[in-house]
Image (cartoon, rainbow, N blue to C red):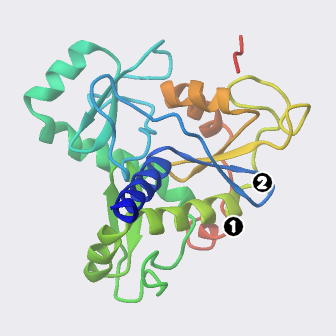
Amino acid sequence: MFRTITSILAVLTLVAVYNNGVLAADDGHEHHDHDTQKSMKHTASADSGIYTLLVDPLGDSLVNVAKPVARVHEGRQLLFASEKNVATFKKNPDKYLAGVDALIIKQQDPLYPLTTCVVSDDKLDMAGTPIQRVIGNRLVKFCCPGCIGNFKKDPAQYLSKIDAAVIASQKENYPLATCVVSGEKLGGDMGKPLQYVAGTQLVKFCCKGCVKAFEKNPAKYLSQLEAKPTKNPETSKNHQGHNH
């Protein structure tokens, strides 16, 4: 009985750690933020990821919205510019989700860090044009349909592989010397910066408090990074008031 309870607790602990974003300090080790990301009514599933678009599903800008409205639809987080837009979306979600996925692919593709399939490690174009899928709010590329099925068996394993590749490809050429939230110098008195992956974009923070602020309105801060795009050496070969 004791062994059974221990096993259950271990599984729950692993799920909780993955549901919370993985933060990597710039020291080669992983650190986990244990504050669960929640929508106003629901908790996002493990593979949803944060909503990285600068506009909501109806096309309204989120950049200057003081507090976007968070909802989870079929396991994925969505952010809206207003409650009115939430109500409009609920009337016909499929009408808007196709557009959301298209924008996510357009946004995340230029910095996608892998030229091989995240599941098989085969070249993405081995069997023709790579397959692009939006898993939650994240672009994932596959070499064949069979790899999509294998990915779904253990998404955490493969998303962490993409995260590691994003950090490796962008950390040296990261365009900002200061925290995107606080404006404080990265690597200053607060120690080595935290490295965070939003979609396919590396974001560096001075502290966990800034991560929390970022997750409330990613568009506000990602817009600053999009104005200073990071070069991806892997894919460039194929494509020409602060509280803690």
Q: Determine contact: label 2, label 1, CB under 8 Å.
A: yes
What kind of residue is marked 1?
Answer: Pro
Task: Indicate whether 139 appears above or below 56.
Answer: below
Q: Is residue 243 left or right of residue 26?
A: left
Q: Residue furthest front?
A: 1
Q: Is residue 77 left or right of residue 207?
A: left
Which residue is at 34% across, 88% downward?
127
Instruction: Tell me where residue 8 appears, x and y as whole percent.
Output: 36, 57
Q: Is residue 57 left or right of residue 223?
A: left
Q: Determine the image quadrant of residue 7.
A: bottom left
Instruction: Tell me where residue 191 appears, x and y as whole percent.
Output: 86, 39
Per the model, the C-alpha gap separating discs 2 and 1 is: 10 Å
Q: Which residue is mark 1?
A: 233
Q: Secondary structure at mark 1?
A: loop
Q: Earlier in the sequence, mark 2 or mark 1?
A: 2
Which residue is at 70% across, 21% downward?
244
Question: In the picture, which quadrant includes the N terminus?
Answer: bottom left
Task: Indicate whether 72 appears above or below 130.
Answer: above
Q: Which residue is mark 2?
A: 173
